[in-house]
Amino acid sequence: MEFSELIRTGQAQAELLRGPEAPPLRGTLCVTGHHLLLSPGPQATPDLWLLLLRSVDSIEKRVAGDSGTITLRCKDLRVLQLDIEGVEATLNIARSIEALSSLESVITSFPFFYRPKGLRLGDAWHFHPPERYYKRVARETNAWRLSEANEDFSLCPSYPRAVIVPRAVDDDALARSARFRQGGRFPVLSYHHAPSRTVLLRSSQPLTGPQKRRCAEDEALLRAVLAGSRPGARGFIVDTRSAQTAKQARMTGGGTEAKAAYLGWKRLHRPLERGRPLQESFVHLVEACGDLEQSMDHWLSRLAGCRWLAHVKEALSTACLAAQGMEREGACILVHGAEGTDSTLLVTSLAQLILDPSSRTMAGFQELVEREWIQAGHPFQLRCAHSAFSHAHPKHEAPTFLLFLDCVWQLGRQFPLSLEFGEGMLLALFDHAYASPFGTFLCNSEQERPVSALDPST
Amino acid sequence: MEHIRTTKVEQVKLLDRFSSSNKALTGTLYLTATHLLFIDSHQKETWILHHHIASVEKLALTTSGCPLVIQCKNFRTVHFIVPRERDCHDIYNSLLQLSKQAKYEDLYAFSYNPKQNDSERRRGWQLIDLAEEYQRMGVPNSNWQLSDANRDYKICETYPKELYVPRIASKPIIVGSSKFRSKGRFPVLSYYHQSKEAAICRCSQPLSGFSARCLEDEHLLQAISKANPANRYMYVVDTRPRLNAMANRAAGKGYENEDNYSNIRFQFVGIENIHVMRSSLQRLLEVSGTRGLSVGDLYSGLQSSGWLRHVQAVLGAAVVLAKAVTTESASVLVHCSDGWDRTSQVCSLGSLLLDPYYRTVRGFMVLIEKDWISFGHKFSERCGHLDGDPKEVSPVFTQFLECVWHLTEQFPQAFEFNEAFLLQIHEHIHSCQFGNFIGNCQKEREELKLKEKTYSLWPFLLEDREKYLNPLYRPQAQEFAVLEPNTVSFNFKFWRNMYHQFDRTLHPRQSVFNIVVNMNEQNKQLENDIKDLESQIKKRKNKQADGVLTKELLNSVRPESPMLKTSLCFKEQTLLPGNDALRTIDSSNPADNRYSEYAEEFSKPDPAVVSLEYGVARMTC
C-alpha cells in the first residue's frame, strides 16, 4: 500500500495554535506518510514543527468562510489547533490525517521507517533478556531454573521464550499447568526477594470452571514454589478481582484456586478496576483537567467522580500488601486476575519497585518495564490504541500502563530521594507507549514481535 | 494555680489518631501552670500549652480507662487514656479552667520570662518600625502625608495613631468621612507602589443605606484618585459577595454608589464572612480527621467543606488588586464590612504579590505588623484568647497563611522563608506567649501596657532565622518582582503540613528540603575552605616575592612552609567526607543504605500509610 493514496492534499498554508504558552506558528503545512510538518518558510526561523501522525487521537474539523480549522487531540493529551486557508484544503488534509493516523497494520507504522542517527539496528534490542534476570536470581537461590518450554510459543502465546520456573518442575508438568490456566499463562517467577528468600509469581486465572476441575501439576508447581522458598513459608494468592467476580468467572470456565487443593496457600481478594471502567475514569479525568474555568467545587467533585485517584490508591495498596507479605510475613505471593496481563502486572511491578532498590535506578526501572510489561505480554497495541480523546468506542483500550506510571509518580512524591529517575522519564514512557518513533511498545506479546520482524527493522 | 487538682498521673496511654489502638505509648502526664506535659517511656516529651487547647472532651469509660480527647488550635489532636476515672475528671476540669482565661492579665505572655533585660525587651519591640516601613514605600511625599487626626484614637478607636492620607484631604474631610464609615474606619493608605504611584487603601463599608451620601467621603475618595497622577480612575473593591452587601443596606450600611462618586469603578469579589469560614474549616478538619478515609470521600469532603474555594477566592481578590496596580497603575480602595478581616487578607496578599520585600523574613513580619496588627485585626477575639463569644472566633489569619503557603508552592524561589516559618507564626498567634497578638487593636494594646509587660515575638524568630530560611530563595530574580499566581482550581491542594502537622505517620519519610539545606551548608563550607587556601597561597607567594629581595626574609619563610603543607593535607582530609556525602545525595548508587532503609520503612508494622497528592488519603492494608 502506498501512503500517497491516502494523502489528498500535500500542502497548504496554515497557522498553528499551540495553546496559551507558545506563540502561534505560521507556515506551510505538509502531510507526509507519518508526519505532519509545518515549515515557517525560508526567511523565518528554521524551527520546523513536526507531529507524528500516529499520536493523533481525534480530529475535529470546522469550516467557516474560506478557511477551516482543524483541532487535533493527541494521545499525549496535547490539543492543537490548525487554521488552514481554503475549504477544500482543510477537508482534504483532515481526511488524510484521519486515514493516516488510524492505520491498523503494524508493518506500515513509523518505527519501521525511523532511523535515528548513530544507532545501528538490532543493537539495543534485547537489552534485558530474561536470561539476564535469571542470572541474578540464580546467584541468590538455587531453587529456580530457566525453562525454554515456551520456545515456540506453543505453551503460552503471550509469554517470552524463556521463563523462570521452580527447578523441581519439569517441562511436561509446565505444559499441563499451562493448559489449566487461561491463555496458557502458568505461574512463573516475577521477582525473587533475596533478603527474605521469598518470591513473587504471576499467572492467569485457573480454568476450574463450574465443575471445579483441578490440575495436579499446577498444584505441584505451587507446592514446589513453597518448598523452594525458605522452610515453613506460607503462600498468598492475591486475586485482583473481588470474590464475587471470581466466582462468576467459573461460569465462563475460569475461577480461582480451591482452598483444599493448594495446601499452604491462602487466597486474598483485592478488587482492582480494569478495562472499560478504567478507561472511562481516565477520559473523565482528562475532561476535568481540560476545563480551566471551572469552579473549585466543580473541579473537586469531578476529581472525586472520576475515581482515578481511587484506582491509584487501590493499586498501590495492593502492591503494598504483596510487598509486606513478602518482606514481613516471609510469604510467597502469587498474583493473578483473569487474564494476568493487566492488573496482575501492575501489582507485581509496583511490588518490585517497593521491595527492590535496584529497580529504582534508571537502568533497573527500564529493565522492570521491559520484563514486567513488554515481555510479560501486556497487550500495548490493544490497550494504547487510543487515548482519552478518541470518539471510538473503547473495546480493549485501558490505561493500565498509565496507572502504573501514576503509581510510580506517587511513590516518588512520598520518597523523593529513592527514585533515580524523575518525572520526565515517566512522561516520556507515557508518550512512547501511546505513539513513538521506536518499536519498543509495538505489538501485544513476544510472539507477535518476531512475526512482524520488529527487531531487525526498528 | 488554684485550678490544678492533680499534678501528675502515671500509666497514661497516648493513642495515635490514625493507627490501630494497640500501638499506644504509655507514660506520665504532668499538669503545670502553663503546660500539659506527657513523657512517654522513651523519654520523649510532648508539651501542650494550655492556651492552645481548643476543646477537651471526656469520652465514655472503657475497660482500659477513661479516654480524654484534647483538640488544639494548632490542629494537634491528642487522645489520652487515663487509668482512673477520678484522675481523668480532675485533669478534665483543670484543663477546662486553664484553657479559658477571663482576663488578659492571666495570659501566658504576662508571666513568660525569656531571661531578657529591659533594654533588650525594648529593642525587641522597636525591631519593627512602621514609620520606617512607610518611608521605605516612599511616603510621605508630595501626594501623601502623615495625618495626626487620630492621635488620641478619637476618630477611630481601632485604627493606629499614625495614618497616611492624601495631602489634599483636610482634617474636616477626614472627620466627615469617618462619620460615614462603619466604626469610623475611613479610607487610609495601606500600601504605596512607588514606581507606579498607585496606592492600595483600606476602609470599612459606607453607611449608605439605600440612598444616603456623604460629600466629605466623596471628596476623600476623589483625593485618593487625584493623588495618583498615572490613572484618574480608581477601583473600589468590596470583598463581600454582592448579596451580603445588599443585605447590609437594609441595616443602613452597604456599598458605594458608582453614580455618587466620580472616577470610581466598583466591584465585588465575593469572599464569604467569618462565620462561613469558621464552619468551613471545621468541616474540613472533620473530614481530614476521619480514619480510613477513602479517596472519594476525601474529595467530596474537600468540596463540601468549601475551604479551598474560599482560599481561591481570597487569592483571586489579591490578584485583582495586583493587576489593577501593575497593568493600569490604578489605585485601589478595599473594604468589607468592618474592614479588619477580609480587607486585611486582601490588602496584605496584594502587597505580597507586588513587593518582593514582603517575601523576606523581616518583610513578612512588617507586613503582619502593618496590615494585621496595627489596622486592628481582632486577634484576641478571632483566636479565642479569652473566654468570649465563640461566634467571634474565625480562622481568618490561618487562611491568610494558607494563601501565602499556596504562593510559596507556586513560586518556590520567590520567598526567603519556608513553611516552618508560617507554621511557627501560626503557633504563636494562639500561644499568647508573646505580646504581639494579644488584644484587638492598638488602643487596647496600649492600655494593657503590652510593651512594658510582655515580649515581642519577632526577635525570637530572627534568632532562629536559619531554621526558617528557604534554601531555594533567589532574591535577585527579576521574574519574581511581581508574582502572578495561577488561580485555576487544580493549583489548590490540601495543606497537610498545617492541618496534620502533628500526625507524623501521614508525612513522607524523606525530605528533599533537608538534603538541599545540608548540601548548601556543605557548599558554603567548601567555598570557605577554598577561600582559606587561596589566601594562604597568596600569602606564601607574597612572602616568596619578598624573599627574593631580602635573604633574611627568605629564612623566616622557611619555618612556615612545612606548617602550610600540613594544613593543606589536613584540608584535603576534611574535603573527602564532604565529597562522599555529596555522592550519596546523588542517589545513583543502588547499594546505598537509604534504599534498604526505605524497604524497611515501607514494611513497618503499622498499616502502610500512603498519602496521595492533593490530600491525605490513607490506605490500610
Image (cartoon, rainbow, N blue to C red):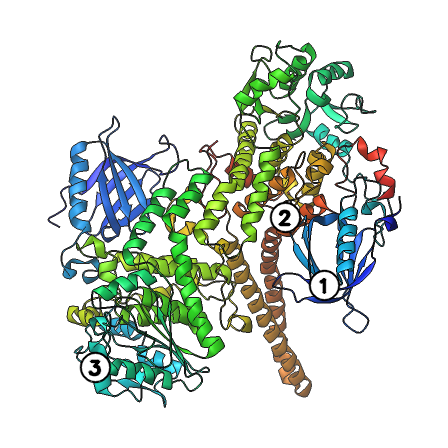
The answer to whether tags 3 and 1 share a subunit is: no
Image coordinates for residue B189, horizontal then vertical, percent? 33, 78
Instruction: Name the amino acid type tagged 1.
Output: Ser
Q: Quadrant of residue B291?
A: top left
Q: Which residue is mark 2?
A: A420
Q: Nearer the viewer, residue A222 or B408?
A: B408
Q: Quadrant of residue B5?
A: top left
Q: Which residue is mark 1?
A: A67
Tell me if mark 2 has few (under 14), some (14-19) or many (20+) residues whose alpha carbon lies within 10 angstroms of its own.
Answer: many
Tell me if mark 1 has few (under 14), some (14-19) or many (20+) residues whose alpha carbon lies within 10 angstroms of its own.
Answer: some
For the question of whether residue B132 can be seen, the reply is yes
Image coordinates for residue A104, horizontal then vertical, percent? 79, 40
What distance separates the C-alpha of mark 2 from that of mark 1?
Answer: 49 Å
Q: Earlier in the sequence, mark 2 or mark 1?
A: 1
Callout 3: chain: B
Callout 2: chain: A
Give the label, 3 or 2, closer to the camera: 3
What distance separates the C-alpha of mark 3 from that of mark 2?
Answer: 68 Å
